[in-house]
Image (cartoon, rainbow, N blue to C red):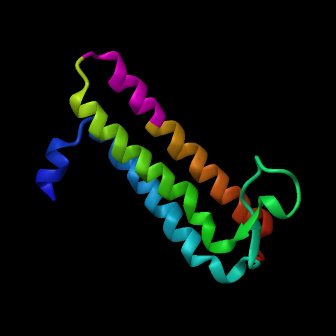
Amino acid sequence: MKKILAVVPYKEIVIPAVSVNILVLLFTLLVQRNLPPIVPLFYGLPTGEEELAQKIFLVIPSLVSLLIILVNVTLIKYAKDSFLPKVLVGLIIGSTILGAITTIKIIFLVGSF
C-alpha cells in the first residue's frame, strides 16, 4: 500500500478526493432501503420517465468521479509541463465535489428519513 501511495502525485488532494467518493458510495449503498425504487438521476434528459433510474444507479456519479481520478492521476504522471497537472487536479476536485453534491442532494430529496 505504501508503494502505491509513494507514486501518487498530489497526494494531499487525490487521497481526500478518493476518500470522499468512497464515503459517498458507501453512504449511497447504506441508504438504499430508505429510497424509492425509482429516483430522478438524469436531469439533463427531458422531464418524465427519461430522467428516472433505479436507485442503485445513484452510485454512478461516485464511480465516474473515481474513474476521472484514476485517468487524471495517470495523465499527471506523464505530463511534461507544469500547467496540465494543475488543470487535472482541478478536474479531480470538481468531479468529486459535483458527484458528491449530486448524489447526496438526490438522496435527501427522495429519501424517507
Q: Residue at x 49, y 70 (%)?
A: 26
On screen, residue 52 versus residue 32, left or right, reads: right
Q: Is residue 84 above or below residue 36?
A: above
Give the quadrant of the C terminus. bottom right
Foreground residue among 55 and 107 = 55
Question: Residue 50's image quarter?
Answer: bottom right
Question: Residue 98's image quarter?
Answer: top right
Q: Which residues are magenta?
A: 81-91
On screen, residue 52 versus residue 74, left or right, reads: right
Q: Main secondary structure of the magenta part?
A: helix
Foreground residue among 32 and 63 = 63
Q: Residue at x 28, y 31 (%)?
A: 76
On screen, residue 56 versus residue 34, left or right, reads: left
Confirm whether residue 13 shows in the render. Answer: no
Q: Residue at x 28, y 39 (%)?
A: 74
Q: Residue at x 28, y 41 (%)?
A: 11
Instruction: Name the residue at the bottom extreme.
Output: 33
Question: Residue 68's image quarter?
Answer: top left
Instruction: Name the residue at the right extreme.
Output: 48
- Number of numbered discs on residues: 0
Q: Is residue 75 above or below residue 14?
A: above
Give the quadrant of the N terminus. bottom left
Task: Give residue 24's position: percent from left, percent from top.
Answer: 53, 61
Task: Give residue 34's position: percent from left, percent from top.
Answer: 71, 80
Confirm whether residue 57 shows in the render. Answer: yes
Task: Give residue 75's position: percent from left, percent from top.
Answer: 30, 34
The verdict on residue 90 being magenta is yes
